[in-house]
Structures are given as C-alpha cells and as structure tokens.
Amino acid sequence: MERFYVFAVSLLAFSLLFHGGIARAVRRSLSSQKDASEEWGYVEVRPKAHMFWWLYRSPYRVEDPSKPWPIILWLQGGPGASGVGIGNFEEVGPLDTNLKPRNSTWLRKADLLFVDNPVGTGYSYVEDADDEKLFVKTDVEAATDLTALLEEIFNKNQKLQESPLYIVAESYGGKFAATLGLSALKAIESGKLKLKLGGVALGDSWISPEDFVLSWGPLLKGVSRLDNNGLEQSNSQAQKIKQQLKDGQYVEATASWSELEGLISTSSNSVDFYNFLLDSGMDPVSATAAELSEIISMKRYSRYLSTLKPSSTPGGGGDLDSLMNGAIREKLKIIPKNVTWGGQSDQVFTVLTGDFMRPRINEVDELLAKGVNVTIYNGQLDVICATMGTEAWVEKLKWEGLHSFQSSERSPLHCGDDRLTRGFTKSYRNMHFYWILGAGHFVPVDQPCIALNMIGAITKSPAST
C-alpha cells in the first residue's frame, strides 16, 4: 500500500551520482570491500525466484561495546511496492529522488537494508512471469523467502552478525514483518540463521484489515469528510466485509474492500486515504499509488502504486520510475536486461489477493509472548491504517502484559528545543506504542524529526542522545 513518486533526474545530479560528488552514500561499492559504504546483490531464494537487496553502512556509526550499532531491515507495503525505491529514495535512505542528501536519513541511527519483497517487486523477479507458482501466495511464504535472503546475507558475514537486526515495516509490510519475525526466530533457534533479532516495528501496518475498514466510517464522519449517509453506507459495507472474513471468504473480502474505498471516495469527494486533511492526489508524497489498477481488477489499488505528482517544494518534481529504470539501474550494473523495475508488481498483488485481508494479530501476539520487542507506531492523519483501527486490534491481543500496557501513562514527544507536542508514547515490558501527531500514512516523510528520534529509541542506537 504505497505510492510511487515522480522526479526528473537533472544532469547535474546525474553527474554527481557518477563522479562522487554526493558524499560517500552514492559511491559504487564492491561487496568484497570491507570498508564499503554500500553493497547490493541478488539472492535466489527459490529456484527461478530472485530477490534484490541493497545495504547501506552508516557514516554516522558510533562504536560502543555496550550498545552495538543496529541494522534496520525496511519492509515496504503494497503488496508489490518497492523498498529499494520508495522506502529508500522517498522516505529514509541517504538520498532523495533528486539524488540530494536527506538530512533525516535513518542512517544517522543505524545501517539500512532495503529489499524488494516479495519476489516480483521492484528489481526482484521470477524467471517465468507466466508461472504463477513462482510468486508467493501468502505472507508466510513471503517470510520464508525473506528468511532465505537473511541467511545468505548474514551467515557469511560475521561483522553483520554482531549488529542486532530490527525489522521495520510500513503498511502491508507489517504483515510481512510479523510473519518474518517468527520465521527468523525459528531459523535462529535451529541454527540455520546467524543473527540477533533486536525487534519488530509496525508502522501504520495492515495487521487487521477488519478493524481498519470498520474504523473508516466513524473516523471520516468525525472529521467531517463523511455525512450520516456516507457513514451508513460505509458501515454497511464494512459489516459485509466483517462477515466475509468470519466465513473465510478472503478473496471476496478483498473485492468488497475495493468497493468500500470507492463508496468512501464518492461520499467524501475523494478524501486522501493517506491523509484525511487532503483530497486524493494533493500530497506529493502520499499522492501516488497506481498503475497496477489498470492491470488488475481492483481499481482502488490505484491508491497504492502510482506516480508522484510534481512536488510543490523547491527543487521538487520528477519520476521515480524513470530514476529507478535509468540512473539507479546504471549505477547498480547487475539488473538483468529483461527486468524492469516494478514490472511484475501487479502480479505480486494479484497472487496475494487471497491473503490480503487475512489478519496477522496472532503473529504479533506470538512475537510478544516470545519476548521480542514489538513497537507499533501510527500517524494521526492516516485513514487506510487509521490509529483507531490499530488500537482496536491491539485490544484483541492475548498477551499477558496487555492490561498493564493499557493502564500505563503516555509520555509526550518533542523535537529538539521545540516544545510543541509532536506525539505520545508508552511502553510496558517489550511492547511500545507511538502516536505521531501531524503525520499521515508516511510517518518518516510527514514528521521526519520525530520519526528519527523514534527509530533511535527503538533500535537503542548509540547515536541517540
């Protein structure tokens, strides 16, 4: 459930990319260089299924024996949205889509590992796109592939094994994160995977589709984007989805979800599902998400994968698709000639249709029971994964510490010397929750300062103050 963004790469930025003028983060590094700032590659996670990864080593690394430097694995949503493209260049990586340094990059707190997951997403690909069996059909299958990727990357690198890995997800990526967390733990316990799992962070994550669709009507009525008629229609369709999920009709529920988004869009004059203060298409960051909608039957999926409108900010504007299939492809050198960035993304979503509406609350419960640090964070202005829906599925957890967590007090969040309240947080044992004010679905973009502080706290980064 993400959006693609459009920027034209200037000749100057292109030149800087290839001549080393944009700091060390844009240097082409060889995987054999121990001091390399970057490396990337493919892992054949299954026969004929190839997953692309890109690792950035932080130039801000702090050596502290008592607090090892962390690694963040970023998982994008969709399903079918590219972490290597969107998460990297649009949200938390070292460069933005104009190939300019990002001051709020999460490299300030950790190393960053981006993947194009599941296979078929971004630069990842299957050798025969007509063979549906090569694509994953469930979140669990996606987690198995990701575990194979981690085994290949970490088992051969003792230095990486010394750093705790934090799985940080956005949107549908949260379902992958929950299943991967359990899969990775199993592999670690059996000795197949050599890494330290530091925790799992679920950002505006599609953990319980039922709770989210039930929240849409009341939320939008409360902020005046729906009237009573719109609320009635929304609630009626949401109840239909609830019954379909109860009956195990997951494919039908996905179709009904699409219809519900259409109803709400019509009744609200096209509210932006990623920021209820805006109309769809207004925000240059959350304004995208489509192209797949022209290929698959879910027309409302256009909210998740599309092209970004020209930015209203100075120097903004461009095309992420062109960047990834142009300058970045040339930089990487290893993308097969017959592979187009995002070329199989529509198939990724289509094949996962039967799992799209399946909840992953039990997996979160199991992670908590196993003592894994689980962080949940949500943007105040998000609709698609509304805070109201997130709080509803959290209340369904069977974790023994839930009552104490709910009874604990929240603490306000600030940035620097600014005393304006930017959010709230509370924790109990290994569960943590962040309410991020003034942010929509894309928290690191809407509130970069608070997001950076938050990720520093989540990862216990030595760079955090």
Image (cartoon, rainbow, N blue to C red):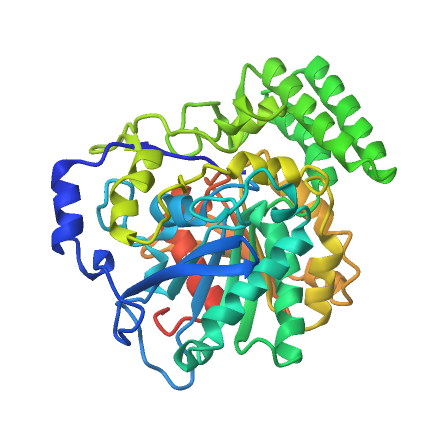
Locate residue 123, reporting x and y percent: 42, 47
Q: Is residue 57 left or right of residue 261?
A: left
Residue 352, can we see it? yes
Residue 103, can we see it? no
Residue at x 74% of width, y 44% of height: 358
Locate residue 106, reporting x and y percent: 36, 58
Image quadrant holding the C terminus, namely bottom left
Q: Is residue 142 left or right of residue 33?
A: right
Pick the front one: 371 or 251: 251
The image quarter containing residue 317 is top left
Q: How many marks?
A: 0
Q: Is residue 322 above or below residue 16?
A: above
Pick the front one: 287 or 38: 38
Residue at x 75% of width, y 34% of height: 251
Q: Is residue 193 above or below residue 147?
A: below
Q: Is residue 175 left or right of residue 288?
A: right
Pick the front one: 352 or 450: 352
Locate residue 258, reporting x and y percent: 66, 25
Locate residue 366, reporting x and y percent: 73, 65
The image quarter containing residue 245 is top right
